Image (cartoon, rainbow, N blue to C red):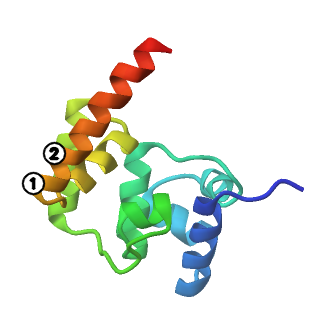
Amino acid sequence: MQKKSGLAVRLKALRREKGVTSQVVADAIGIKSATYRRYEIDTKPRDEVYVALADYFGVSVDYLMSGKDHTGVLTAADSEEYKTVSAAGLTTDEALLLRKLRTLSSSDFEEVMKFIDWKCINGQQN
């Protein structure tokens, strides 16, 4: 039997914690029940579904994706940020990276940028 992804495990745990069926979750976020059930097995949702799921369960998108920041609740600002990110054509991973970069001090940010530059240069040589 295939091991479930972290997302699948987190979704099932959140749903059980809330005491609802997969049908209730699916109806609440506007998708088919079978589609939601696939997320609890191992299918990755579209970017906009992450936001709807995070909003429904009262967790952050970061938590759904990585298992970290369970206490972070999706806010209206997060929703606006998602619209901006979506309009810019960024992937979920790119948006997550930007969000994390914004939390760094300026010196840590510079260090990360130097590392990225180094990886880009070394990656092109290989």
Position above or below: 49 against 116: below
- Left or right, 49 with reference to 2: left
Residue picked out by circle 1:
106
Single out the residue that lies furthest toward the top. 125
- Left or right, 39 with reference to 70: right
User: What amino acid type is highlighted by mark number 1?
Assistant: Ser
Q: Residue at x 22, y 57 (%)?
A: 79
The quarter holding residue 15 reads: bottom right
Residue picked out by circle 2:
110
Q: Position of residue 100 (x, y in %)?
A: 27, 55
The quarter holding residue 4 reads: bottom right
> Of 36 and 100, which appears nearest the observer?
100
Local SS, label 2: helix
Count of picture labels: 2
Q: Residue at x 22, y 47 (%)?
A: 111
Circles 2 and 1: CB distance less than 8 Å? yes
Local SS, label 1: helix
Q: Specify few, some or many for label 2: CA neighbours under 10 Å numbering under 14, 14-19, or 20 or more.
A: few
Q: Is residue 42 visible?
A: yes
Q: Residue at x 90, y 56 (%)?
A: 1
Position above or below: 57 against 77: below
